[in-house]
Amino acid sequence: MRIKTRYMKKYVVAAIVILLMITGARTQDLKLTASARSVVSVGDRFQLTYNINANGGQFSGPDIKDFRVLSGPNISTSQSYQVINGKMSASTTVSYIYYLQAFKEGNFEIPAALVEIDGEEISSQAVKIEVVQGRAAQSGSGGQGENAGEQQSEGIAKDDVFVKAFISNTSPYQGEQVIFTYKIYTANVPISDIDIENLASFPGFWATNLSSDRQQIEPRQEVINGREYMTGELYKAALFPQKSGEILIEPKKLNCTAQVRTQTNRKARDPFFDSFFDDPFFSNQFQNVRIEMQSNPIKLNVKPLPIEGKPSGFSGAVGQFNIQASIDNESLMVNDAVTIKLTISGNGNLELINTPEINWPPDFETYEPKITKNIKTSSAGVSGSRTFEFLAIPRSAGEFTVGPIELSYFNPREGKYSKVATRAFNIQVEKGDQPAGSVTYSGVAQEDIMYLGQDIRYIKTGNYTLSTKGQYLFFSPLYFILLAIPPAILLLVAVLLTSTRKRRSNVALMKNRKATRIARKNLKAANAFLKAQKKEAFYTEVSRALWGYLSDKFNIPLSDLSMDSVRGRLSAKNVTEESIDSFIEVLNKCEFARFAPAESANLMNDIYQEAIMFISRIESELKS
């Protein structure tokens, strides 16, 4: 029970302290101070802090032009208090924190900031900062010593968050597959909004993305130099160098948002209050800071493929491959089709392998092969297979041998060339009874087969219209007709433009044509007010629609239209008495309803329908 009473007294005293602090903060002199490092180096990130000893002001930050603003202003509030000889004093400090980065050398001055409190403007001093080349000493600036013990920002060091590039082999052969990876490392710093420029750009390489389409990075733990990091793969690709020699993979710039924790430290004044306010709930705050970093460059020394032992049929295949082939028919008739299916499988630059050559007999008519691929990508690289389907048609009988089909490739593991081959295919072609213009086939990919008997057609015979030799279009009747068409088109366009200008210059005519459209637009607005039950706005739009329609349709100025003169003016325009009575009745209802103490929604709806009927009746009378 004594423990509960002691804690209860502790919280009561803390509450009293906060109330006294709030009421007494304004009794002290208001002062706005600025602090930052006086010397920084190009590329350094540093903190600019403005402190004011009051709460509730309107802060106006400085115009920062010579530094890159990474984040800010981030607002932080701290409290301090003292009990001396039984007297308690309290103060509040509000901090406005900027995170800046220097990007050029020179001496710069950040102008003063302003805070307005209860109509009073308080300004800070200007901050002078020298930016030097290279790492500057961590020297403090004037004005920072006063608050150095009260506010300490846990900034981000270079080894807190960084991105690193990895390559599986820095000395590959030309065309050999290497695995390239970007990984990000963070040590207890939450990050988000990761963005890498030109992520998939690798000059000098043919690249294939190996990363999955997942939305989130899978984190893992790694220990580097005794420090634990959370790491994840940003991007992984299989690279195939297309030239030999030295190739440099340039560093990539990465931007991300890091959550930085700032902790308020206070000088020990009283054990009781320090134990209360040192709770993490009161002392920790976080700011989101946009940081920039770049990966390390990677230099590859690509070895050329050796000349010694290079096969004559080598077509650039680098990796480990197998080859298989099958034929659909080894005994067929003349003009029948035969298909040889060839499959190359393995891992390496599969998609860069040229189409293998088959030495067909001269009596075979061949076609371009159909190519299908089944390429698989994984963290280990690119593998799979490519299938070539070769189609041929024998045009004469006999016994023929096709193959064997060979594939020469360079094996980077063994550092030498290898060769794989299929068996030879013996094809028996017999003379058939089919005419020369026919063909049969089997297998697939034969949409390009041509009928040999139709390659050269007979001369067409029959009655045809012949023209006399020596007739030309020049100076013929058709020639002069074609010459006259462009001037006629230009003349027609000129007449249409002149007519359009005359119509547009006739103001009365243009108003007449637009009268119905404008009235419908006003009635549409009135309908919206009707649905919303806005009485005044509804009746105003209905009156505007009716008066405006009569003014535009009959070219009567609005100043000449009134409830008294409308009958005479409309009768002079040959408007029927029924239409005039309808118009006057709608206007009278509008005027009555606007000033009536209450009316039903049905009345508003009746007025709206009568206005529509009036305009429709006038339009029908004018058309008849």
Image (cartoon, rainbow, N blue to C red):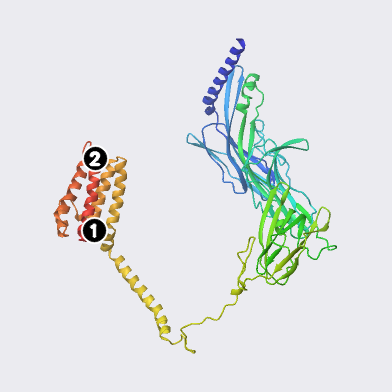
> Residue at position x 75%, y 55% from top?
248
User: As shown in the figure, which amino acid type bears the numbered disc 2?
Assistant: Asn
Q: Nearer the viewer, residue 615 or 569?
A: 615
x then y, percent, for residue 58: 51, 37
Q: Are marks 1 and 2 in contact (CB under 8 Å)?
A: no
- Observer-nearest of 577 and 288: 577
Q: Up-down: is 158 above or below 2?
A: below
Q: Position of residue 133 (x, y in %)?
A: 72, 49
Of pointers 1 and 2, the one earlier in the residue sequence = 1
User: What residue is drawn where x is 24% and y is 50%?
Assistant: 612
Lateral position of residue 563 relative to residue 528, left or right: left
Q: Which residue is mark 2?
A: 602
Task: Give the residue at mark 1.
Answer: 553
Q: Position of residue 556 (x, y in %)?
A: 21, 58
Q: Is residue 203 visible in the rendered structure shown here?
A: no
Q: Is residue 143 above or below residue 376?
A: above
In the image: residue 115, left or right of residue 215 = left
